[in-house]
């Protein structure tokens, strides 16, 4: 496999994390993003659960893309997503009951998360299995990273803790502000992080384009 074809194969994996980041670039799944990111652990758990469902549903939709009639494709996609979403709930209820209770209703609502349906419709239904799985991994990792980062910042500023471990020097300094674990604080942190992430990605894309142009110019010379 040539370097160009290898890069093309793994492109969905990288673009899902940065260029097509569901939280900060596509602004999808905002409801669970704001609701569960009161702590880093909640954000990480919701992200991993969504990633599992996304990868599995993308694979099944891609396998069945030539057999699902266009008229019933959306109900079929939802059925596939609901199957894996229910599986995640059953596993977490059995083995991680405290985390299951912490995520609450939003774990059940993974089935209607617009990220999953959007990727099934716009990518998995049009591409082979391997690129679809890589797309699911990329989007899922980007979503998990975003939720964990938001949860980390909100938990740190709102409670003085990180992954449930109290940082006594922050508590003693009076840094924790309850507003950051409330909806208003969630919107505030989300907005600032969206600006920072987009500026960073655009700057990286600009540098990459300049580097490619420089290489192309050097090759032509």
Image (cartoon, rainbow, N blue to C red):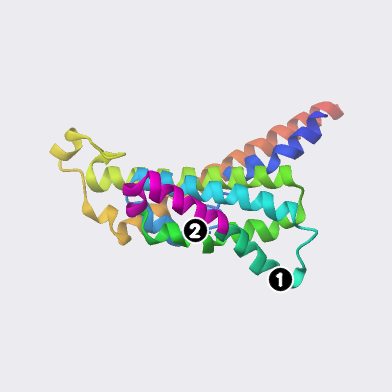
Instruction: Report the side of 181 relative to 170 (left or right).
Output: right
Q: Which mark is residue 55?
A: none
- Tell me: residue 175, above or below residue 107: above
Q: Which mark is residue 72?
A: 1
Rendering coords of residue 6 (x, y %): 76, 33
Asked if residue 197 shows in the view, the reply is yes
- Tell me: residue 28, above or below residue 143: below
- Tell me: residue 21, above or below residue 11: below
Instruction: Report the side of 160 relative to 61 (left or right).
Output: left
Rendering coords of residue 99 (x, y %): 35, 48
Q: Residue at x 69, y 59 (%)?
A: 122
Does 99 appear in magenta?
yes
Q: Earlier in the sequence, mark 1 or mark 2?
A: 1
Magenta highlight range: 83-102
Q: Residue at x 46, y 62 (%)?
A: 109
Quadrant location of the C terminus?
A: top right
Q: Main secondary structure of the magenta part?
A: helix
Q: Residues within 10 Å of mark 1 (few under 14, many from 20)?
A: few
Q: Which residue is mark 2?
A: 110
The answer to whether marks 1 and 2 mark residues whose Cβ atoms lie closer than 8 Å is no
Query: Foreground residue, 100 or 4?
Result: 100
């Amino acid at each position: 496999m040539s370097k160009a074809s290898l890069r093309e194969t793994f492109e969905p994996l990288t673009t899902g994390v940065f260029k097509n980041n569901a939280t900060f670039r596509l602004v999808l799944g905002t409801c669970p993003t704001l609701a569960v990111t009161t702590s880093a652990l909640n954000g990480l758990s919701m992200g991993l659960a969504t990633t599992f469902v996304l990868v599995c549903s993308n694979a099944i939709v891609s396998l069945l893309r030539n057999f699902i009639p266009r008229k019933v494709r959306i109900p079929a996609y939802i059925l596939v997503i609901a199957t894996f979403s229910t599986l995640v709930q059953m596993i977490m209820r059995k083995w991680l009951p405290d985390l299951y209770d912490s995520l609450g209703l939003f774990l059940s609502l993974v089935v209607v998360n617009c990220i999953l349906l959007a990727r099934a419709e716009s990518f998995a239904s049009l591409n082979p299995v391997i690129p679809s799985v890589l797309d699911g991994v990329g989007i899922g990792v980007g979503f998990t990273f975003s939720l964990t980062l938001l949860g980390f910042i909100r938990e740190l500023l709102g409670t003085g803790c990180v992954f449930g471990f109290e940082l006594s020097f922050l508590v003693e300094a009076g840094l924790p502000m309850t507003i950051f674990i409330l909806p208003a604080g969630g919107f505030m942190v989300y907005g600032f992080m969206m600006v920072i992430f987009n500026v960073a990605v655009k700057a990286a894309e600009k540098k990459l384009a300049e580097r490619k142009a420089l290489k192309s110019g050097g090759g032509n010379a």
